[in-house]
Amino acid sequence: GMEDRKKGEGIDFSLEGKYTSLGDNFNTNESQGAFNFLSSYAVNDQLEFKLQSDLYLTKRSIQGNKQNRNFFRVRPSVYTKISNFNIEVGVNVVYENDTIQNANKVHVAPVAIASINLSDHVSFYAGISGDVDYRSLKSYIEENPYLGSAVTLSHNIKTFEVIGGLKGNLWDNLIFHTGLSIGSYDNLAFYATSSTDSTRYDILYDLDNPSVVHFFGEL
């Protein structure tokens, strides 16, 4: 990867790239090139422009049947700080060319998050967003290593999410973060035992816009 070593002077940026290859004994394999770009430009202490971009070029082969799954996301945003308030507003634009689902789709969703310092040690934040979670065979196998070799792959589309939480530090070395998110999804993935092999799992997708409620906390 590459990054700007003179941070704070003009435009800061970083670029990372990696290549992965995955195969099994059933003539199924996946190769992927991933590129992640981050940049920011601080106009002053109160105003900053940001840009995040991700590109995934994926090829999958199932017994000689080749499939291309390409994914590109760009997220421009503006960050500003006013007194105790911090606000970032942007947009997620995602293009996917997923031949597995015979799809050529562009997804556009707003991103907005605001935070306020309640004290010197605690802040509250809230936001709304939408996005597309890139999913590959590798990412699914990392969650469930017992997947079948010819499962159908699809990205998880987060059509809308509301999130809020608290974070801060109670003592010098004890940091906490807790909150709640409520989201609506399309193509949300679930694992189910394969009908042809009870030792393996298939992936099923809920296409009826299920809602997901997530409570989280960490120290």
Image (cartoon, rainbow, N blue to C red):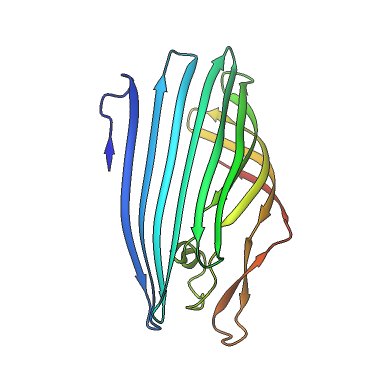
Residue at 51% from the left image edge and 49% from the top image edge: 95
Residue 66: x %, y % from top left: 41, 73
Residue 84: x %, y % from top left: 59, 15
Residue at 34% from the left image edge and 32% from the top image edge: 13
Tell me: 35 left or right of 101. left
Decide which of 219, 88 is in the foreground and name it: 88
Tell me: 207 left or right of 170. right
- Residue 20 appears in the figure: yes
Quarter in which the N terminus is drawn: top left
Q: Using the image, determine if residue 180 lies above or below residue 31.
A: above
- Residue 134 appears in the figure: no
Tell me: 150 left or right of 208. left
Quarter in which the C terminus is drawn: top right
Residue 214: x %, y % from top left: 68, 49
Residue at 59% from the left image edge and 37% from the top image edge: 177
Figure quadrant of residue 127: top right
Decide which of 217, 43 is in the foreground and name it: 43
Q: Using the image, determine if residue 210 lies above or below residue 194.
A: above
Instruction: Give the tally of numbered discs.
Output: 0
Residue closest to the far bottom: 196
Residue at 40% from the left image edge and 27% from the top image edge: 40
Tell me: 183 left or right of 28. right
Residue 93: x %, y % from top left: 53, 42
Figure quadrant of residue 128: top right
